[in-house]
Amino acid sequence: MNLNPHISVDCVIFGFSEGTLKVLLIEREKEKGLQVGGHKLKLPGSLISEQEDLDTSAIRTLTELTGLKNIFLKQYSVFGDPGRLKPMEDLEWLCRTSGMKVDRVVTVAYYSLIKISDSVITDKTIWHPVDKLPELIFDHNHIVMEALLNLRNEFHTKPLCFELLPKKFTLRQLQDIFESILNIKLDSRNFRKKIRKLDYLTELPEKEKNVNHKPAKLYKFDRRRYEKKETPLI
Amino acid sequence: MNLNPHISVDCVIFGFSEGTLKVLLIEREKEKGLQVGGHKLKLPGSLISEQEDLDTSAIRTLTELTGLKNIFLKQYSVFGDPGRLKPMEDLEWLCRTSGMKVDRVVTVAYYSLIKISDSVITDKTIWHPVDKLPELIFDHNHIVMEALLNLRNEFHTKPLCFELLPKKFTLRQLQDIFESILNIKLDSRNFRKKIRKLDYLTELPEKEKNVNHKPAKLYKFDRRRYEKKETPLI
């Protein structure tokens, strides 16, 4: 595969567990035969191949890493600051591992929403709470923050929370997701009152299992019903 | 200015006049000393400079062309199909005019909304109705269509129409803009009923002038009042 040393894709993969929004990070690949590299964390991504479209590169990166297909993926921004490949140590690592002379890379950034329970993740990866990120390579902390802002904006008007939740979920889980992504605290009673008015949430005749508190009712999202709703014009 | 032959920016500049949404096109630059080139139309844009950030490149392109500053500009997508620099005649033209060997260019696309009346446009440019575009170079027709779809989506939830309208406008102009961008026909009575409920539209004590029909009332958009509105959570 011929790589293009000028353009890359990076994927911010969001997941949700233990009441917290998380992002999937991988260890900087160790270099063959060398003891350097490793330790520092990065977003999944790579230089694009000369023969590949951008979306194809991103989908390949995701599928290889998570084993999932047909997942929510959105190209949300491009990062092209001429000085973004800092510090020098990270740039040297990139040149050594890619075997190419790299001066400047414009990276096309995607974010993705997955159900952590469905994914098959290798032991080189780690789910990290998004509000407590360590220092990542290059401008990857900035790329994650921009993805989060973008997600927050979209969250108000699109049913994105259901990409992160299991198929059957409790209202507590739904509230946790809103609070975590929007970084706010919601009043449970008001939240439930609002939620019950939404006709695209179906209450199931089941309750959660294996919990050490009173089992809560389970709900599911009815996408067909949601899509029938009209968007107000103005 | 050192150009980067791998990455470009392209700008889809929308304007509104005569009841129609238009896009700003420029003639393919004529080559020095040659009779070829010209005629075919393209979007404003250029290869980025090695020293420049992407947004800076786009802003420079826009300002040079329209004389406007502080205008609405949104990076909405990236086009990186390995086969996008077709037909061959267009690619040859790009290589000759840039003086560089170009194989593949990933272009970062922006759209912009301007008030046609405010802009200073040179005689090399043309405002073209967006629904009747001629064949543009490369994939520029596709880039315009994607910008339009993106604009349509945003139009439902953001006050973008006021970027295109003059500061003082009639309700007829407002309705024209909605009909043109969303490609629908609205019932005038219902539309006006809805509009009158919006507290961020201020009726002015003036009417339009120099028209050969009954002058209509003028309105203006109150951005401060608009921004006070709360976005519904779910």
Image: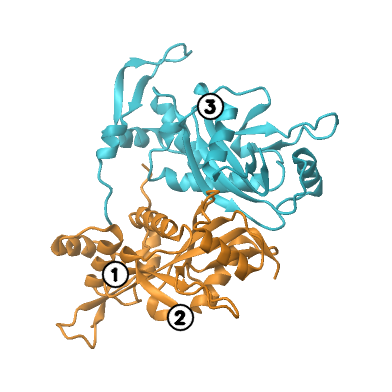
Chain colours: A orange, B cyan
Check if mark 1's residue and mark 3's residue have beta carbons within 8 Å: no
Of all residues, the one furthest to the front in this rendering is: A35
> Foreground: A21 or A70?
A21
- Marks 1 and 3 share the same chain: no
The subunit letter for the residue under badge 1 reads A
The residue pinned by badge 3 equals B17
The residue pinned by badge 1 equals A20
Is residue A126 left or right of A103 when viewed as pictured?
Answer: left
- Marks 3 and 2 share the same chain: no
Q: How many marks?
A: 3
- Which x, y percent locates residue B191? 37, 36
> Foreground: A11 or B78?
A11
Q: Amino acid at mark 3?
A: Ser
Q: Is residue B11 above or below residue A111?
A: above
Asked if residue B22 shows in the view, the reply is: no
Q: Amino acid at mark 2?
A: Ile
Label 3, secondary structure: give it.
Answer: strand
The residue pinned by badge 2 equals A121
Q: Earlier in the sequence, mark 2 or mark 1?
A: 1
Q: Report the Cα–Cα distance between label 2 and label 1.
A: 18 Å
Q: Amino acid at mark 1?
A: Thr
Of all residues, the one furthest to the top in this rendering is: B210
- Residue B102 numbered mark, or none: none
Residue displayed at 25% across by 45% down: B230
